[in-house]
Image (cartoon, rainbow, N blue to C red):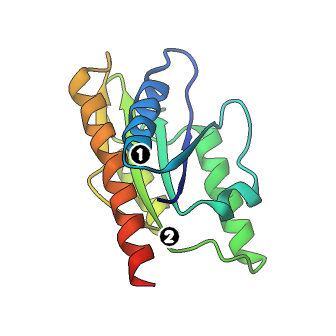
């Protein structure tokens, strides 16, 4: 059914990790192979990225912007693109957590649109993470897999 990588930053509270895990559960339930990468622990390797059929990207809202390690991921994609790697066009879904504000949505979507085809609505979750937010992420994971499956059947 395809391979998805869930790329996210999470540390202090684990909120974004909870959302990432719910999204991964939805994608696995829809039949995808899923790999989670916390950018707070390591960077995404080019080979991992290229082998994925779809991408989910999550971040906490840090000063109305994406976490630094998520921005580094976008910088890496830019450099891969500039070096001639085929990195553009994968379907992607987006999610974020915040303690208020929630202004990270605009920069996250703006960065993603340079490289990805966004599917579904960006999921926002205020602290504390609710079951409703987790359900939205679960459904977002399912939607990403459905999009990958329909793309594969058109080839």
Q: Is 142 placed left or right of 65 in the picture?
A: left
Q: Which residue lies furthest to the bottom in this view?
A: 155
Counting other residues with Cα less than 10 Å from the Cα at mark 1, is it few (<14), some (14-19), or many (20 or more)? many
Res 112 label: none
User: Which residue lies under the disc numbered 2?
Assistant: 114
Q: Look at the picture and state if 3 lies above or below 61.
A: below
Of mark 1 and mark 2, the one earlier in the sequence is: 1
Q: In this view, does 96 lie above or below 79?
A: above
Residue 1 as seen in the image, left or right of residue 45: left
Residue 117, percent from left and from top: 41, 69
- Report x, y in % for residue 56: 47, 49
1 and 2 marks in contact (CB < 8 Å): no
Secondary structure state at the residue bearing disc 1: helix
Disc 1 and disc 2: Cα gap in Å? 24 Å
**Relative depth, front residue between 129 and 28:** 28
Asked whether residue 109 is in view, the answer is yes
Q: Mark 1 or mark 2: which is in front? A: 1
Residue 88 occupies which quadrant of the picture? bottom right
Residue 101 seen in the current view: no
Which residue is drawn at the image coordinates 37% and 56% (left, top)?
144
Q: In the displayed structure, does residue 77 sit left or right of residue 102?
A: right
Return the residue nearer the eye: 146 or 124.
Answer: 146
Looking at the rendered structure, the secondary structure element under dot 2 is loop
Picture residue at 75% right of the left edge, 60% below the top: 47
Dot 2 surroundings within 10 Å: few (below 14), some, or many (20 or more)? few
On screen, residue 3 above or below 59: below
Tag 1 residue:
27
Q: Where is residue 9 in the image (x, y as percent from the top left)?
A: 57, 34
Please tell me in which quadrant of the rendered image residue 153 appears.
bottom left
Residue 122 percent coordinates (x, y): 31, 49
Report the number of discs. Answer: 2
């Amino acid at each position: 059914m395809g391979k998805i990588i869930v790329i996210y930053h999470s540390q202090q509270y684990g909120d974004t990790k909870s959302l990432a895990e719910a999204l991964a559960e939805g994608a696995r339930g829809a039949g995808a192979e899923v790999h989670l990468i916390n950018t707070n622990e390591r960077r995404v390797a080019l080979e991992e990225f290229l082998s994925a059929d779809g991408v989910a990207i999550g971040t906490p809202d840090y000063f109305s912007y994406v976490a630094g390690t998520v921005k580094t991921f976008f910088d890496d994609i830019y450099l891969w693109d500039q070096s001639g790697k085929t990195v553009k066009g994968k379907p992607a879904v987006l999610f974020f957590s915040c303690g208020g504000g929630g202004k990270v949505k605009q920069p996250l979507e703006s960065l993603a649109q340079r490289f990805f085809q966004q599917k579904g609505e960006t999921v926002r979750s205020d602290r504390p993470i609710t079951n409703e937010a987790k359900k939205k992420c679960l459904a977002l994971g399912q939607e990403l897999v459905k999009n990958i499956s329909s793309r594969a059947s058109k080839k």
